[in-house]
């Protein structure tokens, strides 16, 4: 066994198995006294190979749009503290998520799945307008200190009837202590049209509801919380 193959098996172990059905909770490591919850690794499958996705050419971005009612916030304006009160308020923020590792997996030389491991430690808080000094609501709504990693696991790439330009991505998304199934259309490119195995490029976007994902504190009067994720994976 050569060094490259050993390295592939180690990374495959760290990124865990791709199989996942339904919704589950991600539990803390009982041996970790810090209380942090990471994506749990599983032993690699026999006859599995992996191809690394180029994270320098790939990206994972999030735009969060949020609406709240009966909004009240104390802010510093021109050196004086004042209270802002609104019946309704809308906010938005753009965040670039750092990709820690990303791989396509093949089992018995056939495409099996893909996995993108995200570093959540640098996720920005939701801000008012274009400024960067006033934070709104919970500044760490993803609890990145406790949940430093998240993951997108691509389970399958299927055709879409009457749509030759895009394919249907079936995946699971893990954020905080929740993992759920998602599906979204994406443009897929292959190096060889006669060999549609592992994509050389995937680009797509999907939405999740921050209220259903419980990304807001219990006392927040949130009426809308939309998170738009844009993902580009290049091999």
Image: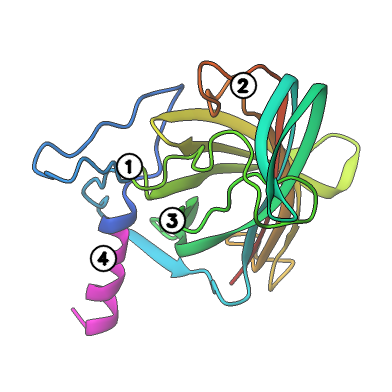
Q: Nearer the viewer, residue 208 or 21?
A: 208
For the residues labelled 4 and 2, the Cα–Cα distance comes to 38 Å
The first of marks 2 and 1 along the sequence is 1
Q: Earlier in the sequence, mark 1 or mark 4?
A: 4
Above or below 117: residue 18: above
Instruction: Specify the segment rendered in magenta.
Output: 1-12
- How far apart marks 2 and 3 lie (CA) works out to 21 Å
Residue placed furthest toward the bottom: 3
Check disc 2 and report the residue beneath it: 211
Q: Any magenta on residue 89?
A: no
Judged left or right of residue 13, residue 187 is right
Q: Is residue 206 above or below residue 66?
A: below
Q: Residues within 10 Å of mark 4 (few under 14, many from 20)?
A: some
Quickly name the residue at label 4: 9
Which comes sooner in the sequence, label 4 or label 3? 4
Residue wearing tag 1: 146
Q: Earlier in the sequence, mark 2 or mark 3?
A: 3
Q: Quadrant of the N terminus?
A: bottom left
Residue in the image at 54% along x and 71% along y: 55
Residue marked by disc 3:
121
* Residue 168 placement (x, y as % from top left): 72, 40
Q: Is residue 168 visible?
A: no
């Amino acid at each position: 066994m050569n060094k490259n193959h050993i390295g592939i098996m180690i990374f495959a172990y760290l990124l865990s198995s791709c199989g996942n059905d339904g919704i589950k909770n991600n539990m803390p490591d009982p041996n970790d006294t810090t209380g942090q919850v990471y994506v749990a690794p599983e032993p690699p499958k026999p006859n599995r190979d992996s191809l690394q996705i180029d994270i320098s050419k790939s990206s994972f971005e999030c735009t969060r749009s949020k609406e709240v009612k009966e909004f009240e916030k104390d802010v510093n304006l021109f050196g004086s503290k004042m209270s802002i009160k609104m019946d309704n308020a809308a906010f938005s923020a753009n965040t670039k998520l750092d990709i820690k590792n990303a791989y396509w997996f093949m089992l018995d030389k056939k495409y099996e799945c893909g996995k993108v491991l995200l570093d959540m430690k640098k996720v920005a808080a939701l801000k008012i307008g274009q400024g960067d000094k006033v934070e709104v609501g919970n500044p760490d709504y993803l609890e990145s200190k406790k949940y430093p990693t998240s993951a997108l696991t691509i389970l399958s790439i299927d055709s879409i009837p009457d749509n030759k330009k895009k394919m249907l991505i079936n995946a699971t998304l893990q954020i905080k202590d929740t993992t759920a199934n998602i599906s979204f259309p994406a443009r897929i490119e292959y190096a060889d049209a006669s060999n549609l195995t592992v994509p050389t490029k995937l680009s797509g976007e999907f939405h999740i509801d921050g209220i259903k994902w419980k990304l807001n504190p219990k006392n927040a009067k949130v009426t809308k919380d939309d998170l738009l994720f844009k993902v580009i994976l290049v091999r």
